[in-house]
C-alpha cells in the first residue's frame, strides 16, 4: 500500500521538489473562478506532528499530510535519523525504533521548520545535535526562545559552528517558563518545548505559549500518544510528564492559510468559490475581514463560499498572533486591496520586513506606498501582467492572485517557494477555471 523511504526518493513527488526551482508559473489573467475545492492538511501542523513521531518506538500513522517540499524534507529527515518511513496518498507511517541524535546539515539547512526535531530528539535521547536551519527571507527568526525553553527544563546548550548541541543527560525536569518574545509568542518554540516536556519529570507550565490551532493539533496528537497536556490553544499550557509514549493515529487539521488564500482568490474574481474540508472557527479573522469589506460569505459547518463585490470597501488590518489576523495572510490581502476601488492599510507587527511582494506588485501596476511596517494600498488601478520574482512562500501566493486579475500574462519565477506550502496550487486553481501553466525556466 505504501512506498518505502528509498523508493519514495525516486518518485515524481520527490523529484518535483528538487526541480521546482527551475520552473516558473505562467498566469493568464481574467479567467473567472467558480466551483469547489478541498483544502489540504495543514503544513504547519504536519511538520511538528511528523517530528513528534520520534518520541516513541511504536508505529505512528499520520493522515492528510500535504504533498509539499517542506513535508517531503521532513520525511527525509526522519529517514536520515533512522526511522522507517512509508508514504502514500497523504498517509505517512513512521516507526522510529532506533534513531540517531544528529540531524544532518544538508537537509536541515533547507527548511526553517526542521528545528522542530530539537524537542523530540532531546526528549527521547537526552541529547542531540541539530544544525541551525535555513528558511525564507522575511526577517529575523531567532531560535533563542526554543533554547530558552529547553534550558528551563534543565538542558545544557552550546551553539557553535552553525550547530546546536543539547545535553540533557541528567534528565528533564518540569518547571515554569515564559516563551513570549518581542513580536509575540513562538509557534515552533512552543511545539519544541511541549514535545520535550512530555517525557520530563514533574509539571511544566508554559506561559506566553502560542495559541495557534496548529499547536493545539500537535497537543492532540501527543495526547493520543499518552501525553498529559492541558491548555493547548491558549497562552498557558500545562504538561505533566510521563515515562513513555506509545504509537497513535492522527488526522491533520485543514490548512487555514491555504483556505484563506483561496477565499481571497474567490473574492477577487469569479462567480462563487466554495471551500470544503475547512474548519471555519480557525478562519474567523479572515472571513470577518472579508465580510466587513462587503464580500458575500456563506459559512457552514465545514465549508465556506465567497463571491466578489465590485462595491467592496477598503480595510485597515494589523497582523497579530492568533486569534488576531495572521501574518501568513498579509501578502494575499495586499493583492485583494489592489482590486478594491478604495484605500486599504495593512500593518505588519510579526515580521515587519515582510513586504517584499509589494515591489513586485508595483511592477504590475499596483499603487502601494510602504512606510515602515505599514502598507497603504490605493486600489482600483489596472493591473497588467509582468515577470515577477517570488521572495517567500506567502509572497508567491500573493503574486499568483495578482496575476489572476491582471491583464495579459504574468510570469512568476522561483516557483519552489509556492511548492513549500501549497499542495498543487496550480491544479486547484485550474479546477476553478484559472488559466495557468507550469513550465521549465530556460
Image (cartoon, rainbow, N blue to C red):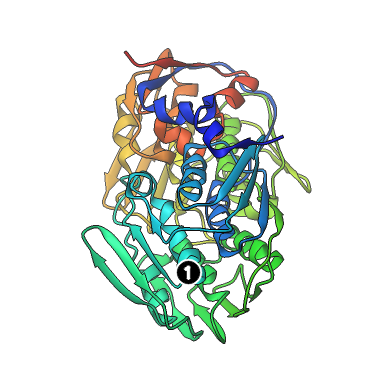
The residue lying at 46 percent from left, 53 percent from top is 81
> Is any atom of residue 158 visible in this view?
yes
Towards the viewer: 419 or 241 = 241
- The residue at which mark 1 appears reads as 125
The residue lying at 48 percent from left, 75 percent from top is 208
Name of the residue lying farthest toward the right? 301
Q: Quadrant of the C terminus?
A: top left
Left of 314 or right of it: where is 301? right
Question: Exactly how many numbered labels are in the figure?
Answer: 1
Towards the viewer: 389 or 29 = 389
| Above or below 397: residue 48 | below
Name of the residue lying farthest toward the left? 161
Residue 23, given in percent of the width and then of the height, sits at 39, 21
Residue 392, given in percent of the width and then of the height, sits at 37, 39
Q: Quadrant of the N terminus?
A: top right
Q: Quadrant of residue 60?
A: bottom right
Residue 22, given in percent of the width and then of the height, sits at 36, 22
| Above or below 200: residue 338 | above
The residue lying at 53 percent from left, 70 percent from top is 194
Q: Element type at marker 1?
A: helix
The residue lying at 55 percent from left, 33 percent from top is 8
Towards the viewer: 83 or 350 = 83
Residue 3, given in percent of the width and then of the height, sits at 63, 34
| Above or below 161: residue 244 | below
Q: Quadrant of residue 355?
A: top left
> Is any atom of residue 320 visible in this view?
no
| Mark 1 surroundings within 10 Å by alpha-carbon count, few (fewer than 14), some (14 through 19), many (20 or more) | some
| Above or below 43: residue 349 | below
Amino acid at each position: 500500500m505504501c512506498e518505502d523511504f528509498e523508493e519514495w526518493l525516486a518518485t515524481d513527488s520527490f523529484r518535483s521538489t528538487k526541480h521546482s526551482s527551475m520552473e516558473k508559473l505562467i498566469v493568464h489573467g481574467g479567467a473567472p473562478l467558480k466551483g469547489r475545492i478541498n483544502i489540504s492538511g495543514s503544513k504547519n501542523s504536519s511538520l511538528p506532528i511528523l517530528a513528534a513521531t520520534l518520541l516513541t518506538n511504536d508505529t505512528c500513522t499520520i493522515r492528510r499530510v500535504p504533498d509539499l517540499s517542506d513535508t517531503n524534507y521532513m520525511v527525509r529527515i526522519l529517514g536520515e535519523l533512522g526511522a522507517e518511513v512509508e508514504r502514500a496518498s497523504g498517509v505517512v507511517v513512521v516507526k522510529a525504533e532506533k534513531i540517531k541524535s544528529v540531524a544532518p546539515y544538508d537537509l536541515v539547512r533547507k527548511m526553517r521548520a526542521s528545528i522542530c526535531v530539537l524537542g523530540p530528539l532531546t526528549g527521547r535521547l537526552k541529547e542531540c545535535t541539530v544544525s541551525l536551519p535555513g528558511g525564507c527571507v522575511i526577517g529575523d527568526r531567532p531560535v533563542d526562545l526554543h533554547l530558552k525553553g529547553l534550558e528551563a527544563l534543565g538542558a545544557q546548550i552550546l551553539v557553535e559552528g552553525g550547530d546546536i548541541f543539547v545535553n540533557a543527560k541528567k534528565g528533564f525536569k518540569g518547571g515554569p517558563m515564559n516563551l513570549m518574545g518581542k513580536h509575540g509568542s513562538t509557534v515552533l518554540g512552543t511545539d519544541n518545548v511541549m514535545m520535550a516536556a512530555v517525557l520530563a519529570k514533574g509539571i511544566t507550565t508554559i506561559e506566553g505559549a502560542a495559541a495557534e490551532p496548529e499547536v493545539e493539533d500537535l497537543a492532540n496528537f501527543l495526547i493520543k500518544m499518552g501525553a498529559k497536556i492541558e491548555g493547548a490553544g491558549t497562552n498557558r499550557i500545562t504538561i505533566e510528564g510521563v515515562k513513555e509514549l506509545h504509537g497513535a493515529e492522527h488526522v491533520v487539521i485543514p490548512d487555514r492559510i491555504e483556505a484563506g488564500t483561496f477565499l481571497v482568490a474567490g473574492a477577487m474574481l469569479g462567480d462563487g468559490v466554495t471551500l470544503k474540508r475547512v474548519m471555519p472557527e480557525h478562519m474567523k479573522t479572515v472571513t470577518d475581514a472579508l465580510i466587513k469589506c462587503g464580500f458575500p460569505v456563506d459559512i457552514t459547518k465545514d465549508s465556506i463560499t465567497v463571491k466578489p463585490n465590485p462595491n467592496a470597501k477598503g480595510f485597515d488590518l494589523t497582523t497579530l498572533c492568533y486569534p488576531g489576523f495572521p501574518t501568513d495572510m498579509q501578502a494575499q490581502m495586499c493583492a485583494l486591496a489592489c482590486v478594491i476601488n478604495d484605500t486599504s492599510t495593512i500593518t505588519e507587527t510579526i515580521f515587519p520586513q515582510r513586504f517584499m511582494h509589494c515591489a513586485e506588485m508595483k511592477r504590475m501596476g499596483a499603487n502601494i506606498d510602504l512606510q515602515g511596517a505599514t502598507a497603504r494600498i490605493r486600489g482600483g488601478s489596472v493591473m497588467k501582467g509582468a515577470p515577477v520574482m517570488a521572495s517567500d512562500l506567502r509572497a508567491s501566493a500573493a503574486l499568483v492572485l495578482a496575476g489572476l486579475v491582471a491583464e495579459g500574462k504574468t510570469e512568476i519565477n522561483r516557483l519552489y517557494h509556492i511548492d513549500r506550502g501549497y499542495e498543487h496550487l496550480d491544479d486547484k486553481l485550474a479546477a476553478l477555471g484559472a488559466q495557468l501553466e507550469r513550465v521549465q525556466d530556460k
